[in-house]
Each structure stands twice: as C-alpha cells, then as structure tokens.
Amino acid sequence: MKINGVSYHVEIIGGGEHHVLMLHGFTGKGANFKDMLADFPHSDCYTFILIDQLGHGKSESPMQSKRYSMENTTADLKAILDHLGISRVSLYGYSMGGRLALSFATSHPSMVRKLVLESASPGLATKEERLKRKQADEKLADRIQNEGLEAFVEFWTNIPLFQSQKKLPESKQAEVHEQRMGNNVVGLANSLRGVGTGVQPSYWEHLRLIEFAVLIAAGEWDEKFVLIAQEMENRIEKSHFIKISEAGHAIHVEQPRKFGKIVSEFLSN
C-alpha cells in the first residue's frame, strides 16, 4: 500500500465490525501478532489490521531518518485508515508500537474507540533524559550499520529485556530469531534515529486528557515497565493495569493465549 510516498505492508485479518489496528515493536512485524490472534476469543467480531512499520518486515526502508519521525508515522497511520475507509478504531500497541499508538491517540482522539498498551511507555519526561537516550539510540543505530544485522540480532536477543524469552520452546525462539533476521540494517538504524524513545515527544502530560478506555499491561518479570504501567494507570482516568504472570516484555509472544483472552474481554466489554 503506497502511503505518503512510501510503501507499507498491510495485512487484514477477519471481517468483523470492530476494527483493531495492531502496532508491533522494534525489530518486529505485523505478523508477530498472528499467534495470539489464532485463538482469539470472539474473533469473528473483529477486523485486525496488521502493519509492518517503516524499516521493518516488508515495508519500505527510506534512507532519510526524518521520514520515520513520530509525526510522519502518525500521519501515515491516519492515511492508512483513511485509505481503508475506517473512521473509528481500537489501537493495540506493543513497546515501540505502544508509543506510536499513544501518538495517534493523542493526535486523533475522536477516531479511537479503545486503547491497549502492552509493555509501552509515554516516553521520557525530561529533556535531559531524552538527550541521553537519543545519544544512546544514535550509537546503537551506528552499531547496527557498522556491524551488520546478524551481529545486532545476536546482541539484541541477549539484552536483559528479553531474557525471559529464553524460557520459550526452542522452536519459538528460532521463529523470533528468524523474524528479526528478516529486517535490514538501514530500516532498523533509521527507525531508531527517527522514532526512537530519545527523539519522540513526551506524552506524560497528555495522559490525563485521554477519555476512552485503556488497558495497560506489563509482564511480571518486566519490572521497569510494570512501574511505568502503574504510573500511567494513575494518570489515565478510564484505565486498568494488569500484570501478566509468567511473562516478560513480549507478552503476546510469551503468553499469547492468556493475553489474547484478556484483550478480547477488554475490547468486547
């Protein structure tokens, strides 16, 4: 799908009246959610829109990092929904996708029915934090381009954030590894530079303005994001935080059936 001059890979699953836009995390792709959706309760009620973000999967990887910015990506998401003739949607965002979902939700609140945030953050609150993170993201982006995809994926797989995935069956770990290797260095590096946590705006002050229902989830082993989730719950009036047992950062990968049931109940309520 050609959107604002770039090519997006978009997959539609189902034909229900309730549209759900699914936004994956860094190094991921839309198809990452298929395992959770395979046994999703009341699936006939939903139409799921799975998007590969810029620089990921089968979507285009522009050479200019500014093209990946939060502002541009949010405009792309709006254009995709307009192209599909969808005026109201529920958003599901995981990690980086959660930051994008918050950007869209605060920019186009009248289009949002409900919001699901999995292991997500509204960004960094201070300029000092953002500058420090921007420098770290830039350093990691350079590392991706200098050392290559295979070395980066090996490094990324072994960061503390994803250690709980070592508990998954080897076949699932291999599937995650293969999916990450399906990306390219230009796309991943520019995604970090353009829409990384260091360069995105802080949405902390916008949270109190959210009027629709929000489900906030974090895995029990993901202590940093449990704390962030609890703070978001304090600021969003119609929000509910749930801590998922036996899961780390990627809940939809580590507990797809359990979490799918929780998300379905929230969306259908």
Image: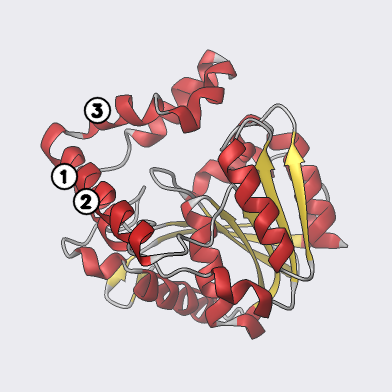
- For disc 1, the marked residue is 142
Which quadrant holds residue 250?
A: top right
Q: Is residue 248 left or right of residue 10?
A: right
Residue 150, label in figure: 3
Q: Which residue is drawn at 66% across and 57% down?
A: 231
Q: Residues within 10 Å of mark 2 (few under 14, many from 20)?
A: some
Q: Are marks 3 and 1 in contact (CB under 8 Å)?
A: no
Is residue 95 shown above or below 12?
above
Q: Is mark 2 on a helix, strand or loop?
A: helix
Q: Nearer the viewer, mark 2 or mark 3?
A: 2
Which amino acid, by three-letter code, is at mark 1? Answer: Asp
Check disc 3 and report its element: helix, strand or loop: helix
Q: Give SS at disc 1.
A: helix
- For this view, does 179 lie left or right of residue 38? left
Residue at image position (60%, 42%) is 34
Q: Residue at x 38, y 43 (%)?
A: 27
Q: Pointer 2: what residue?
A: 138
Position of the N terminus, as image quadrant, is: bottom left
Alpha carbon distance from label 1 to label 2 = 6 Å
Q: Disc 3 or 1, which lies upstream in sequence?
A: 1
Could you classify mark 1 by the number of other residues whose Cα lies within 10 Å: few (under 14), some (14-19), or many (20 or more)?
Answer: some
Q: Quadrant of residue 110?
A: bottom right
Q: Is residue 56 above or below residue 235?
A: above
1 and 2 marks in contact (CB < 8 Å): yes
**Left or right of 239: which side holds 99?**
left
When the figure is inspected, residue 206 is found, relative to residue 193, above or below; the finding is below
How far apart marks 2 and 3 lie (CA) works out to: 19 Å
Specify the amino acid type for callout 3: Glu
Res 198 seen here: no
Q: Where is residue 25 in the image (x, y as percent from the top left)?
A: 47, 48
